[in-house]
């Protein structure tokens, strides 16, 4: 299990808020639920979200294992994914393509990220970056659309 550095979490929250503002939607911080990085934590966090009124119609869960736990929670509460609630994960781990429904997720190129990190480490070991300011690299991401997302559910 891994935990995000605070700066990454803060950037994700800022991105969430900016996206809602750009879309003219209200920001509800109660919709930001943190429970930890595992399947069970995702199940618990999603259960909390799905008990809210009005109930969210879509959830972005980080990482994919949390999204898989979220799908389980929806099913446990008698809801259908994506008909009642859409779920998007983040990481595109292999199991995401094999669960039902197959998980829509954000792929970040883990192999490429590891390769870039290894090259940066080798540069540091060789002394090739001494005296240079820290670099910030942004890893490109791709939305992989599968079966866990759909249009908004019909109004009750």
Image (tube, rainbow, N blue to C red):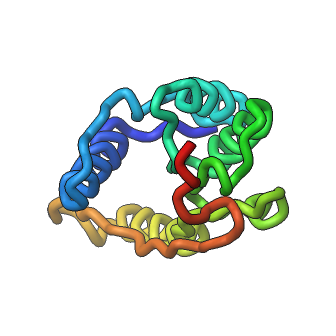
What residue is at 71 percent from the left and 66 percent from the top? Answer: 147
Residue 35: x and y in percent read: 55, 26
Please say if 46 is above or below 84: above
Q: Work out whether residue 79 or residue 16 is closer to the camera in this orientation and state it.
A: 79
For the point 51% across and 35% down, the residue is: 55
Q: Position of residue 145 (x, y in %)?
A: 61, 73
Q: Which of 106 and 19 is in front in this view?
A: 19
Rendered location of residue 150, percent (x, y):
60, 64
- Between 127 and 71, the residue placed more toward the observer is 71
Quarter of the image where one finds residue 41: top right
Q: In this image, 74 relative to 76: left or right?
A: left
Residue at 61 percent of width and 62 percent of height: 149
Q: In which quarter of the image is the N terminus?
A: top right
Residue occupying the point 40% across, 67% down? 120
Q: In terms of depth relative to the viewer, which is nearer, 1 or 144?
A: 144
Q: Quadrant of residue 5?
A: top left
- Which quadrant does the C terminus fall into? top right
In the rendered view, does 51 fall on the left or right side of 99? left
The image shows residue 140, relative to residue 57, as above or below, that is: below
Quadrant housing residue 9? top left
Task: Give above or below for 79 relative to 129.
Answer: above
């Amino acid at each position: 299990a891994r935990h995000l550095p605070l700066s990454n979490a803060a950037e994700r929250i800022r991105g969430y808020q900016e996206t809602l503002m750009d879309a003219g939607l209200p920001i509800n911080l109660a919709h930001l639920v943190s429970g930890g990085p595992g399947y069970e934590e995702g199940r618990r966090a999603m259960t909390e979200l799905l008990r809210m009124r009005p109930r969210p119609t879509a959830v972005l869960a980080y990482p994919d294992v949390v999204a898989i736990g979220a799908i389980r929670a929806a099913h446990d509460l008698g809801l259908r994914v994506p008909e009642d609630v859409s779920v998007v994960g983040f990481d595109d781990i292999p199991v995401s393509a094999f669960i039902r429904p197959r998980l829509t997720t954000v792929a970040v190129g883990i192999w490429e990220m590891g390769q870039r990190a290894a090259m940066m480490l080798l540069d540091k070991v060789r002394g090739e970056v001494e005296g240079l300011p820290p670099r910030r690299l942004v890893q490109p991401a791709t939305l992989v659309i599968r079966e866990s997302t759909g249009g908004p559910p019909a109004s009750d």
